[in-house]
Image (cartoon, rainbow, N blue to C red):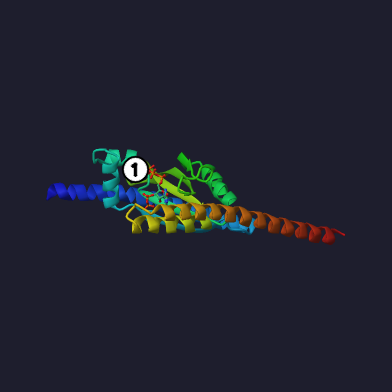
Amino acid sequence: MEQFKRFKDEITRFMMMYKFALDSLETKIEILKEEFQFLHDYNPIEHTKSRMKSPESIFNKIIRKGCDISFPNIRTHIKDIAGLRITCSFVTDIYRIREMLLSQSDLTIVETKDYIREPKPNGYQSLHLIVEVPVYMSDRQERVCVEVQIRTIAMDFWASLEHKIFYKYNESVPPRLLQELKEAADSAAALDKQMERLHDEISQIKEDREEEANAAKRI
Ligand code: 0O2
């Protein structure tokens, strides 16, 4: 009984650390979003969604990786216990957000997987960052990893449908559907390019009009 209580306290404190790291990163993103809106009258972030991995899913992942179950092993081998997904309108916004995170002196990006420059063979696209966040506990400071996935609305739409299909078919999706999913991923990427082109054109028109109006005021 005593042993179980110790284990329960340990796992609760362990998970709390990740929850605090996630809360802190979400606050940072919220601040960046509001400030960016104020300075540029534009918001690069459509929405954010956070999640904590369940103890069951952590357990299964550590077994899958062939590691012994211990807190140090879990910390070293599982970097996505806390996850934050950021959805943007345009691909340039994704890299803009990465730059904003890079410029925060207390954060460290310890790993980058760029599935936009190099999509997965199934068509999956997203920018994955593992960000180390400082967490101040009552008796110590810890640096805790949070996985940040940044993607466009089109990439997110594709990924959520693919995820549903993958689980519906119990991970063995018929080849015809895999082919269609790949085509849909290509269409989503083409849509992202087209929307960004349109957005740039509209921004340019807006800038030109503002300049003209300012010039008229000076006359
Ligand atoms: P959930 O429920 O979203 O958390 P690693 O964590 O590095 O040991 P992995 O899986 O190679 O292992 O990491 P990677 O490539 O960074 O991908 C991890 C997460 O990205 C997944 O988490 C998904 O959220 C997402 N992802 C990666 N590939 C795909 C894909 O092909 N389709 C979809 N829909 N999502 C993908 P989890 O743990 O699988 O799930």
**For the residue with label 1, is its CB less than 8 Å from the closest atom of ligand 1?**
yes
Q: Estimate the x, y position of residue 162 in percent, counting from the top left.
A: 42, 56
Q: Quadrant of the C terminus?
A: bottom right
Secondary structure at badge 1 equals loop
In the foreground, 95 or 170 = 170
> In the drawing, does residue 196 fall left or right of residue 62?
right
Q: Sort mark 1 into few (<14), some (14-19) or many (20+) by Cα contacts within 10 Å.
A: some
Q: Is residue 39 visible?
A: no
Report which residue position mark 1 lands on.
78
The quarter holding residue 196 reads: bottom right
Amino acid type of the residue tagged 1 in the rendering: Ile
> In the drawing, does residue 216 fall left or right of residue 117?
right
The quarter holding residue 163 reads: bottom left
Q: Estimate the x, y position of residue 137 in percent, counting from the top left.
A: 34, 46
In the foreground, 217 or 117 = 117
Q: Estimate the x, y position of residue 45 in percent, counting from the top left.
A: 54, 56
